[in-house]
Amino acid sequence: NAGVTQTPKFRVLKTGQSMTLLCAQDMNHEYMYWYRQDPGMGLRLIHYSVGEGTTAKGEVPDGYNVSRLKKQNFLLGLESAAPSQTSVYFCASSFLHYEQYFGPGTRLTVT
Amino acid sequence: QQQVKQSPQSLIVQKGGISIINCAYENTAFDYFPWYQQFPGKGPALLIAIRPDVSEKKEGRFTISFNKSAKQFSLHIMDSQPGDSATYFCAAKRGSQGNLIFGKGTKLSVKP
């Protein structure tokens, strides 16, 4: 039982490049989330999903897209990376919107 | 109204002391108040949570105190240990469909 896993753990991108972050959970949770964590800013919700095939915007969705084609996976895409997207990205899942289980994070640097 | 304000930003406590972290909110519709603990290089993990129908919840050395009238809640860590050194986030949510709103975090260092 791996919980929530994230791929990759680290990534360096050049401005304008694209990439996809993969989140997988094996707890059969309906709800999944993508957050970004920046120093002094706490955790800010980017997008979330309340079930397979559904997505919704969070607090800071601009510049990101998501897809939830399978219940266990939640993908976060950056179409044209910008230095402002340098951050640590966390995926989480939950049964309802209560206890959220977080992955180990992806550290992304955009140069 | 959606904000959760957390203080202090950082806290240094001697081993064996009491660590206290405070959070305040404006939205009276919030009905679930968790605290998350995050160690360096790891994702946050749920530490303890409270609902507004109780004023205090204790789990081991960790206690949440909740003051509904003041719209404040706090985390108390008794007998703080170096292993408690981490970043702590308070959060709040409204109803079964509301998302968690996180505070900005408190970095706790417990000195031996």
Image (cartoon, rainbow, N blue to C red):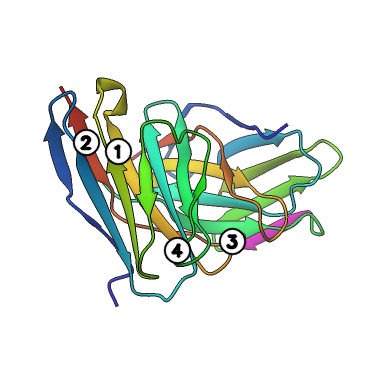
Circles 4 and 3, Cβ within 8 Å, touching? The answer is no
Find the distance from the CA under tag 4 to the CA under tag 2.
Answer: 26 Å
Front: mark 4 or 2? 4
Q: Nearer the viewer, mark 1 or mark 4?
A: 4
Q: Which mark is first along the chain, 1 or 3?
A: 1
Tell me if mark 4 has few (under 14), some (14-19) or many (20+) residues whose alpha carbon lies within 10 angstroms of its own. few
Q: Observer-nearest residue: B103 or B1?
A: B1
Name the foreground residue: B77 vs A62.
Answer: A62
Q: Is residue A98 left or right of residue A14?
A: right
Query: Do the residues indicated by labels 3 and 2 lie within the same chain of the protein?
Result: yes
Residue wearing tag 4: A53
Residue for badge 3: A98
User: Are discs 4 and 3 both within one chain?
Assistant: yes
Measured as percent of width and height from the top left, residue B59 is found at 58, 63
Magenta extent: B55-59
Query: Considering only order in the chain, which callout, 2 or 3, is on the residue closer to the N terminus?
Result: 3
Q: Which mark is residue A88?
A: 1
**Tag 2's secondary structure?**
strand
Q: Position of residue A13 (x, y in %)?
A: 14, 31
In the rendered structure, are the residues bearing label 3 and label 1 in contact, judged by CB atoms less than 8 Å apart? no
Image depth: mark 3 or mark 2 in front: 2
Which residue bears the numbered disc 2? A108
Image spot of residue B63 (x, y percent): 62, 54
